[in-house]
Amino acid sequence: MTEILALNHVTFAYPSEDPTPRNAVEDVSFSVNEGEWIAIVGHNGSGKSTIAKLMNGLLYPQQGDVRFMRDVLSDENLWDVRSQMGMVFQNPDNQFVGATVQDDVAFALENNGIPYEVMVERVHEALAQVKMEDFLDHEPHHLSGGQKQRVAIAGALALRPKLLILDEATSMLDPQGRMEVLQTVQQLRAETGLTVISITHDLEEAILADRLLFMNGGKKFATGTPNEIFALGDELIELGLDLPFAMKLSRLLKAEGVALNGQNMTEEELVNDLWTSNFNA
Amino acid sequence: MDIELQRVGFSYAAGTPFEKRALYEVDFKIDSGTYQAIIGHTGSGKSTVLQHFNGLLKPTEGQVDIGDYRITAGKKAKNLKEVRQYVGIVFQFPEHQLFEETVLKDIMFGPLNFGVSKEDAEARARELITLVGLPTEVLEKSPFDLSGGQMRRVAIAGVLAMKPDVIVLDEPTAGLDPRGQKEIMDMFYTLHKEEGLTTILVTHSMEDAARYADDIIIMHDGKNVLRGTPRDIFADAATLRGYRLEPPRIVRFQEKVEKLLGHPLDTVCLTEEELAKSVAKHLPKERGK
Ligand SMILES: Nc1ncnc2c1ncn2[C@@H]1O[C@H](COP(=O)(O)OP(=O)(O)OP(=O)(O)O)[C@@H](O)[C@H]1O
Ligand SMILES: Nc1ncnc2c1ncn2[C@@H]1O[C@H](COP(=O)(O)OP(=O)(O)OP(=O)(O)O)[C@@H](O)[C@H]1O
Ligand SMILES: [Mg+2]
Ligand SMILES: [Mg+2]
């Protein structure tokens, strides 16, 4: 396992008139291996987007450091690092720089000195991946919410990054669109070994991750596999999360007197449990 | 307040080389007191249509009736300010409706603008900030120094502060944490019932449409194409998929359960609670094992 990104005792507070400002992120250490799919979860204001900005050098920690491929992020290596890191921000409007959709997607590539023909090809490919190839000459700010998110995702994919950071990047997509984007990203992982860090409030997406980083009040509350994290049960709700669909339904079924054995994080587990506990005795 | 759209067409940047048609002959009526969901794939025209509900966008064809106010294509509209007092919209991107120096001023802006006293407006803001699940310290912060979900909550408080008769929600749960999604949607539902509001919910969460709405309108490629109760709409997966939509997770799961049981349940279940009850009824032999 090769480490691709690490936070090492990272603390950050936004500038403030307050002499003792609250830390938005406090003493967080976490490392990500190449090829992993990490989900970052936690209540509103728990520090997730701040972590994303620290990861790509938009913000620098006041204490601790951030390493990409074992190099500490600094002004010297920032551009090199960013050429290998695709990032989709929570609000796509904050990210658009081009006057048209195709210019916008091309922007980062141009910065990286990619030859023109290659660039055009990649822009078209990335826009096709998110089904926005019919909008090449539209102005990015004049699109629907979901279309904006798709264009922002295309911008990150066109870079062909080693690491993709998604900050609630699919929150305004319709259910099919969301599924398609997840599939595209999964396919890229399989084909290219892409590493993915996805900040999400969608628990059904989070249960698909390899590992979760669970934030609470700026601090790392827990890390673990989805099974480990969601075993926390009611504590999840206290910390701003909820139970995934299958777990919630399992509880309701048990309350109605239906025989079940497991906690059933996934639908598949619940169906199997219903079968073995009720039909296959 | 009833809202009625008659043959509404709309183009962005109409009459310029950048003209972009977004709506075609949209025609429907939402009765006062209804909890109306509007669903549709990305770019189908939902946000465009709902900005007609308070005159923020004016139809380029057809007419819009909001209670007694009428907005007709090509005519100058009067009294729009009054309409906006009655119809509050929570926008898809909260950044688009926040603008004041502090959260407190932002929430007070609407009420002050409509003649509420300073003391009352401030009292409302203090009450509402707690209702949307934020600590009162936030009131002194700039709305732009907040996290995405915190901004969403402030935007919601700002619209509630106007005490509108009609509340229009454009993807209100996007960006909220999972507990917040449930709490805020339950809060809107309670308000809807207790205050007799008209609530219009635009959402990609089929689960929320199933749980809360009385009635669903489907938008597809700039037109309203289908309307019905959640039970009828979500029973027909094939039609939904034709409009690039999916039934809620609970309905898809019901199919799997029915395969296990070897027969269908009595009805399409719209919530986890309904499905749990229905399944329990169909598994009598093994109960209490
Ligand atoms: N620009 C800013 N200036 C000052 N404080 C900020 C700024 N952005 C965020 N904060 C504060 O820092 C903390 C962490 O915010 P962050 O945006 O990282 O949260 P988050 O976990 O991404 O939340 P959400 O789920 O709502 O997007 C919050 O308390 C927030 O109010
Ligand atoms: N400001 C604008 N200028 C030009 N065209 C626009 C503008 N806003 C939206 N459109 C276009 O109008 C159509 C309808 O957009 P609208 O925002 O109403 O969709 P929506 O159903 O709300 O989609 P989503 O679910 O993605 O938010 C889309 O094709 C979009 O590209
Ligand atoms: Mg965030
Ligand atoms: Mg929209």
Image: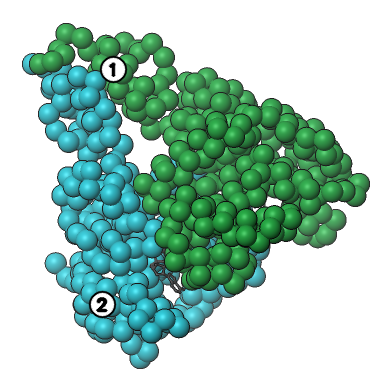
Residues at marks 2 and 1 on the same chain: no
Residue B50 vs residue B13: left or right?
A: left
Image height of A121 relative to A7, above or below: above
From the viewer's side, name the closer residue of B185 and B132: B132
**Badge 1, how many Cα within 10 Å: few under 14, some, many 20+?**
some
Mark 2, secondary structure of its residue:
strand
Tell me how far mark 2 sits from mark 1, CA to CA.
49 Å
Rendering quarter of residue A20: bottom left
Mark 1, secondary structure of its residue:
helix
Q: Which residue has dot 1 on it? A: B279
Q: What amino acid type should be assigned to the residue bearing mark 2?
A: Val
Question: Residue placed farthest to the front in the image?
Answer: B119
Q: What amino acid type should be assigned to the residue bearing mark 1?
A: Val
Rendering quarter of residue B27: top right
Question: Quadrant where the C terminus of chain B lies?
Answer: top left
Residue A63 vs residue B92: left or right?
A: left
From the viewer's side, name the closer residue of A21 and B78: A21
Q: Which residue has dot 2 on it? A: A10
